[in-house]
Amino acid sequence: LLATLQAQIDRTREAEAGVRASEAKYLGLFEASPDAICLWDFDGRILDCNEAAVHLLGFAREEFIGMNVGGLLPPEQLQNFSEFRKKILADGRATVKVRFLTKSGARIPTEVSIRVARIGSEDRMVVHARDLRPGERAEAVKSALYEISQAASGAADLATLYALIRKTITALLPYPNFYVALIDEPAGWITFPLFIDEYDAPPAGRPLGRGLTEYVFRSGQPLLTSSQNTLALRDAGEVDLLGQLAVNWLGVPLKIAEAKIGVMAIQTYRPQEHIGQEEKDLLQFLSTQVALAIDRVRARERLQASLGEKEALLREIHHRVKNNLQIISSLLNLQAGSIHDQAALESIRECQSRIRSMSLVHEKLYQSQNLAQIQFADYIQSLAVHLFHFWRIGADRIRLETNLDPVVMDINTAIPGGLIVNEMISNALEHAFPDGRAGTVRITLRDLGSETYEIAVRDDGVGLPEGFDPAAGGTLGLQLIDLLARQLGGEVRLTREGGTSFAVTFKEQKTRPRA
């Protein structure tokens, strides 16, 4: 009998040792788990929790014990939790995504798994809550980097870029006080193009001083400091206090490779608005993309300003070339007053017409948005009207008809092309309708594709004599048509049916690259 009782006692002790070992194992797993673990009763009262739960939600363990889970849920999720508890009771387990309220009022996204387990003599709910912020933060950071990169490409100016940076950064780090400072070290000057603060107004540009911003810039390293540490830096002579003293201040340098361009900072004035290592790492990670975006848009603004200056200069050059050509034409006109030889006077008039043709190209370029190309159809129309006035031809005697494709042409093609048109129209007006004869001059411009064009001037006048070779024995104007056509890599076709028709087919000549 004694032996039997001793065996039972030994078995009981072994069972108790096994239970204690199991409890110790359970307690070790309970405390070592990276996930928040709690025990709830079926009324939602918290019976126990591990250290991870304390860290996640910010309550002390003694505050947790006895708290009802309803106090950890936003109002809109309480009804959902009631339905969720019914599912647990029915199925013994359930999983749901919940945003728990921390002690400071922040909402923490979690994935909660609950199962019913026998603890001692009672059924309890064992709750595992996994923090989803790392995954959400990774996606948010990825999205932020993309948005900043897109802003650098698409922002029209720096003001637009700074607005996008502010929106992106504050979505990740929702602190109300945020600024970007740009520093021109050679000039010793600091500006604050983006500055949002509860207490201080946006500061104007000023000489570099000894504020926290300059301290970070000089060191080239991030700085996370409390108000006490800031005061210690001041007392050590490292910094001067500027503006309202922040409870927490975080600044990171804006760098491109090793070159520093400024500082980005966030600050808080209330102790519950915590800034920690996670925020420091995140702001530092984003700072490189922000610096690149700022540098890219600043470079684009400088380029646009330089381009605007060059465009203004080039426009002025076209204007002056046009004026100089007009002066030459006026000098020829003065010279013509002392010439009595009719053939010489005719040559001067023809030169004036050619000068006007070239002057008109520069006039059109001066008026154009594109200073290297002109609307050639518009140019031909203006040139034709000018020539009718120049030769004193009334519309009641010779009618002008045009059929012009909308062609944009490079200046290297437009000037010789314009001279060809000038000679063809002038030839028709001067020779095709003698003795007051009436008729029609038709001008066509066709886009043949592959940067190939055809200009044709047709008249229904008296026509050229049979066997006449314009290139060999014609006037200077007709020789110029052939010469300029070959310069453009084109060819001239002459027909004599029902008058005279000159057609020139040529390819566009691109502007040579400038050194």
Image (cartoon, rainbow, N blue to C red):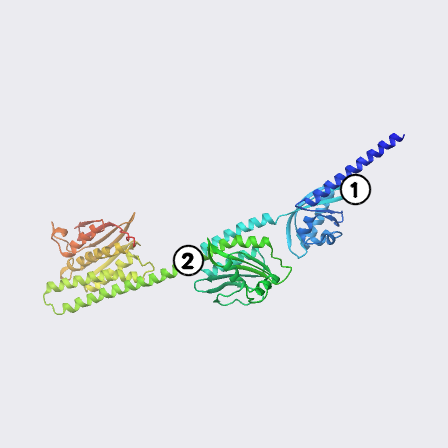
Residue type at mark 1? Gly
Q: Which residue bears the numbered disc 1?
A: 120
Residue type at mark 2? Ala
Can you give x and y, in whole percent of width and height, for residue 353 in the image?
A: 19, 62
Residue 247 visible (yes or no):
no
Element at label 1: loop
Going 83% across and 34% down the picture, which residue do you hit?
A: 10
Can you give x and y, in whole percent of width and height, for residue 265 in the image?
A: 54, 59
Count of number-bearing discs: 2
As drawn, 46 above or below 369: above
Callout 1 crowding tier (Cα within 10 Å): few <14, some 14–19, many ≥20: few
The image quadrant that residue 390 belongs to is: bottom left
Callout 2 crowding tier (Cα within 10 Å): few <14, some 14–19, many ≥20: few
The circle drawn on residue 188 is none
For the residue pair 214 and 133, the one nearer the viewer reads as 214
* Of callouts 2 and 1, the N-terminal one: 1
Residue 319 visible (yes or no):
yes
For the residue pair 377 and 429, the one nearer the viewer reads as 377
In screen coordinates, is 431 left or right of 155? left
Can you give x and y, in whole percent of width and height, for residue 238 in the image?
A: 55, 63
In screen coordinates, is 107 left or right of 414? right
Q: Which residue bears the numbered disc 2?
A: 299
In screen coordinates, is 285 left or right of 417? right
Element at label 2: helix
The residues tagged by marks 2 and 1 sit, at their Cα atoms, a distance apart of 71 Å
**Do the CB atoms of the residues marked 2 and 1 lie less than 8 Å apart?**
no
The image quadrant that residue 87 belongs to is: top right
Going 26% across and 55% down the picture, which residue do you hit?
A: 412
For the residue pair 25 and 381, the one nearer the viewer reads as 25
For the residue pair 305 and 408, the one nearer the viewer reads as 305
